[in-house]
Image: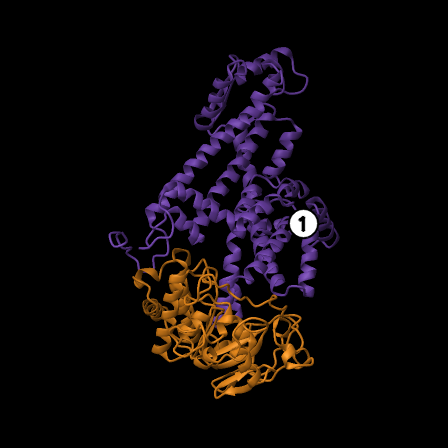
Chain colours: A purple, B orange
Amino acid sequence: MGSARPRRESERGRALPVHVMITFIVRRLTTTIFLLIVVSMITFAIFFLIPRLAGQNAYELAAQYVGRNPTRSAIVQMEVKLGLDKPLVVQYWQFLKGIVAGSHYNDGPSQTYCPPPCFGYSFRSQQPVWPQMVAALPVTVSLAIGAAVLWLTGGVAIGVLSALRRGSLFDRLSMGVALAGVSLPIFFTGLIALELFSYKWALFPNVQYVAVTQNPLLWARNLVLPWITLAFLYAALYARLTRAGMLETMGEDFIRTARAKGLPERTVVVRHALRATLTPILTIFGMDLGLLLGGAVLTETTFSLPGLGQFTILAIQNQDFPEIMGVVMLAAFFIVVANMLVDILYATVDPRVRVALWPCSRSATCACSSRPTMVWSRRWTVSHSTWNGAARSASSASPARARA
Amino acid sequence: MTSLAILGLLRPAGTTITGQIRLDGEDLVSAGPARVRQLRGSKMAMIFQDPLTALHPYYTVGAQIAEAYRVHNRVSKRMARKRAINLLKRVGISQPRIRVDDYPHQFSGGMRQRVMIAMALSCDPELLIADEPTTALDVTVQAQILDLIVDLQAETGSAVVIITHDLGVVAEVADEVLVMYAGREAEAGTADEVFRRPGHPYTWGLLGSVPRLDVPRTERLRPIPGTPPSLINVPSGCPFHPRCAYPARVGGDRCANEVPVPREASPRHLVACHLSARQQREILARPTPGDAPPSRLGGERTAGGRGDAPW
């Protein structure tokens, strides 16, 4: 059967044939879109269905969308404006339509237009939600990306060194610090950092967000403290994960093989051990980053960064339902997309997953079954039987998650 | 263990390795780690027990073989790749041109062991150590791999050390045999000598515990009593004495106190046992029961292919 299969053009051809990759990506995209629709349903249900089930009527619901001490007529107006008097299905349809085509909130006398993508209109602040989120997003992205670079490099480097010098002073010291990093809350480390470096020694005075387009230098300077604070939390976690992974990998038979070849120790560590350790770490990294993009609430609050996290807090404090709903959907969007990217990345990084996507890709003799049902179960076992599985679950239960 | 020590791969913290390991007249124990690393893979190579885990899952087999070659030879990647293809061909992998780009998980166990062998042979080592190369494989594949090792040995003329529990393998491939117990030499000699005139009770035990085709099926195997000793607390004296049937014959506590020195039982045949040559002959000559060695060691019932060999 192998001889009948067309030969690949490139001799080196390590990557999967393009059409297989595309099929996979399309399939993954479809799931993602489906997931996003489910997310929108659940969000919608939380804000519109559950209050109903709890016994609230449209009038009471509408009362929560107007300011304090509203008049009766204002509430009725709001009820009509939001279409709360209509059936839920219609409301949900309006909601979806708004995202694509924009919404008109119309109660006769006054008209409000919310341009697409309309994730709701805040009648408290008298503006649509989407532009507010768009304004807050760059802050969160700046914070998250910068911190991510720091914690990934720092955490992995420390983890590798600790693993190699296991039991040494460096190992015990860095693992101690890592424990502190995991345990100390952001508002503690952040405030200490502010107190010391911003006020006492004035290394980074007057920390406030400056757009990168405005002044890149100032942007970076003012973000250094938040970056380090946030990275500290994650680096601690990543150092521990990397250390554990490296220790395990260094005991693997293929490391002994690498040594038996006569490879220099550096090559053994970097090319063989780290390569195997890093794959699952990258998976977790993608998910952490996705989560963080939805808003680093504590960090942003501590450093008064006007990002999505702060936006969320303000929305909750003001009980601004459309804003809360919008930010929930956006955060969910980031997580779902990050998950998708991680899956795709994993398929390109780990050859075993690659083959599982398309068994019998090119070998004449093929160890695995080609039945599609088997494909999925294999893929599942591959990614979950490896260390990655444990790491994923370990980190999802990790303390860093909810405390960024 | 011994083999890992030879390659300089044994380095648990806080231990020292003493003695001499000589390769081509060069002492590896006193040589620095950098020098040993140079020799590793180039002059001495090793095949491990479990081919399923011994290959890196993320690199193609071609890349892994080429890497082994390139550490010790200054060649381009393309040359190394060619070399890898040649090696794969030599170890009997079909379509080597295509298979170089496959990953280990696309190979079966036997093929992975072939890849390991290809990797070990990449620099034409003078010494090839195969540490139970066939234990993880099923019997038909075992035979193939052994044949391959034997063929390649004949082809390259390198020295091959095979570590195994399988006496069948030994009889099949070995020229010289070293029987080790608890890290110590028990008996050494040409394969012929050791199989014809085994002198050590441990060797008797090993031979007695192998099923044979030429005895009635009702005949029970004779296992060696007891369990292998802890290698952290090796028994005093002759390490085999707690499981041996003959310390009484030696008399006194010699077996428990004195480490037996290998002595020449016959030309090119060393036995490390306190039993005298005469005692050994007596024991072997006895028909069966009592404290005698496994019945099959007794002369009468033997026959079989090895001419006058009593087992």
- Name the subunit of mark 1: A
Image location (x, y in percent) of residue B69: 40, 72
Q: Position of residue B50 (x, y in %)?
A: 47, 63
Q: Nearer the viewer, residue B114 or A325?
A: B114
Q: Quadrant of residue B278?
A: bottom right
What residue appears at the point 58 percent right and 75 percent down from the top-left corner?
A: B183
x, y percent for residue A149: 56, 53
In the picture, measured across the screen, residue B309 lies left or right of residue A39, that is left
Can the viewer see residue A215 in this picture?
A: no
Identify the secondary structure beneath mark 1.
helix
- Coordinates of residue A271 in the picture (x, y in percent): 49, 63
Q: Is residue B27 left or right of residue B142?
A: right
**A21 displayed left or right of B255:** left
Q: Nearer the viewer, residue A190 or A170?
A: A170
Give the amino acid at mark 1: Val
Is any atom of residue A384 visible in this view? yes
- Relative to B194, is A16 above or below? above
**Quadrant that contains the C terminus of chain A:** top right
For disc 1, the marked residue is A182
Q: Nearer the viewer, residue A80 or B300?
A: B300
Q: Is residue A149 toward the left or the right of residue A366 in the image?
A: right
Query: Residue A249 falls in which quadrant of the image?
Result: bottom right
Q: Residue at coordinates 70% horizontally, 60% vertically from top-left?
A: A173
The residue at 56%/15% (across/down) is: A79
Task: Residue at 43%, 26% (x, y): give it.
Answer: A101
